[in-house]
């Protein structure tokens, strides 16, 4: 399955758990990113605690080395390499600032967001392991009407979703709507539109969402977020928040503010999602069609 499993920025070696299985993700000295099983077949040590040597990874326990394909290539204590010591490797691609479990030339959700690589936009990346099943996080990513209640950048007293349009095309569902944002601090007051903000949300199967919101004058924000299942009760989210690179908006203080804001926003969702219990989605508001269409797309 195609998942975004982390961000490129700062990647050296990290542990990536996907559907209950541990992997080691690392960047070799050539710059190449590889993903292997994390369990060393010798005595079961976790390779994530080892180190990168060239484009290989070295086990922390007895120093055995595996290349980017998972082949056991060095056993420091012996002249010969024992048979059966190779480990599983998984194709990964780096694109748009994210690492994807994908093969070369496989179409990626990043193709729907050129701003990820546009030098005229600021890109602020982050990622986090969250409580909650990926199903509930996908529902949250396609949930327009929670924003006014869970997040302080939308107006709780004006939660009406206007001008709704939902359509499924190929591997994505688009949702257009007008919502009412609110300044979460003095800092964003001047950005607030009087008569609602147009939002274009796109859910790209299986687990990516791209949300574009236009505020007053030229203010515009995009969040690209992608999910991967860690296990039944945990989900990893990796994201990039983007805004046009104006002199006012492109300074380290502003960028730090948006970086922190995104972590805060995700934590607000997590507080709800970790407590969610299963319901059959039979009672809905009109704007919930976005969620239902996204689920239909996943069943295809
Ligand atoms: S457990 Fe990995 S080298 Fe021994
Ligand atoms: Fe949210």
Image (cartoon, helix red, strand yellow):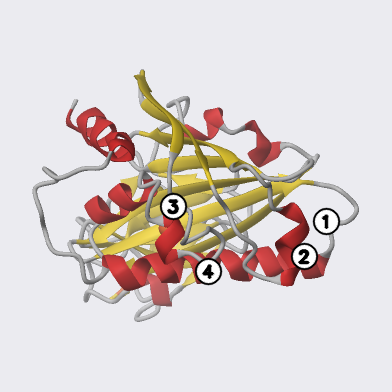
Sequence-wise, which precedes: disc 3 or disc 4?
A: 3
Residue extending farthest top: 170
Provide residue 94's location: percent of width, then percent of height.
54, 43
| Circle 4/circle 2 CB separation < 8 Å | no
For the point 44% across and 52% down, the residue is 159
Q: At numbered mark 3, what does the secondary structure look like: helix, strand or loop?
A: loop
Residue that carries the numbered disc 1 in the rendered image: 250
- Please state which of residues 30 and 192 is positioned toward the viewer in this rendering: 192
Provide residue 41's location: percent of width, then percent of height.
22, 66
Residue that carries the numbered disc 3 in the rendered image: 159
CA neighbours of label 3 inside 10 A, class few (<14), some (14 to 19), many (20+) = some
Residue that carries the numbered disc 2 in the rendered image: 254
Q: Is residue 266 above or below residue 68?
A: below
Quarter containing the C terminus: top left
Residue extending farthest right: 247
Q: Nearer the viewer, mark 1 or mark 3?
A: 3
Q: Is residue 60 above or below residue 7?
A: below
Provide residue 232's location: percent of width, then percent of height.
17, 62
- Please state which of residues 22 and 151 is positioned toward the viewer in this rendering: 151
Sequence-wise, which precedes: disc 4 or disc 2?
A: 2
- Please state which of residues 252 and 101 is positioned toward the viewer in this rendering: 252
């Amino acid at each position: 399955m195609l998942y975004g499993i982390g961000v490129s920025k700062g990647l050296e070696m990290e542990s990536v758990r996907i559907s209950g299985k541990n992997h080691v993700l690392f960047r070799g000295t050539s710059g190449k990113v590889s993903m292997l099983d994390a369990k060393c077949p010798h005595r079961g040590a976790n390779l994530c605690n080892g180190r990168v040597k060239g484009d290989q990874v070295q086990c922390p326990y007895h120093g055995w080395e595996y290349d980017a394909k998972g082949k056991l290539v060095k056993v420091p204590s012996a002249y010969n390499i024992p048979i059966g010591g190779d480990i599983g490797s998984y194709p990964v691609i780096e694109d748009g600032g994210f690492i994807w479990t994908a093969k070369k030339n496989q179409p990626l959700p990043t193709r729907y967001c050129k701003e990820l690589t546009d030098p005229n936009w600021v890109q602020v990346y982050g990622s986090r392991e969250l409580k909650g099943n990926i199903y509930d996080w996908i529902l949250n990513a396609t949930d327009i009407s929670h924003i006014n209640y869970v997040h302080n950048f939308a107006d709780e007293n004006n939660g009406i979703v206007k001008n709704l349009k939902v359509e499924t095309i190929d591997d994505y569902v688009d949702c257009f709507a007008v919502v009412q944002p609110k300044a979460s601090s003095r800092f964003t007051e001047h950005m607030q539109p009087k008569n609602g903000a147009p939002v274009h949300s796109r859910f790209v199967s299986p687990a990516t969402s791209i949300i574009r919101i236009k505020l007053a004058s030229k203010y515009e924000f995009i969040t690209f977020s992608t999910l991967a299942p860690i296990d039944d009760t945990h989900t990893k989210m990796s994201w990039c928040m983007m805004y046009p690179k104006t002199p006012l908006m492109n300074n380290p203080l502003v960028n730090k503010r948006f970086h922190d804001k995104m972590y805060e926003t995700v934590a607000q969702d997590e507080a709800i999602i970790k407590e969610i219990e299963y319901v059959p989605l039979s009672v809905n508001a009109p704007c919930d069609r976005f969620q239902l269409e996204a689920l239909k797309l996943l069943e295809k």
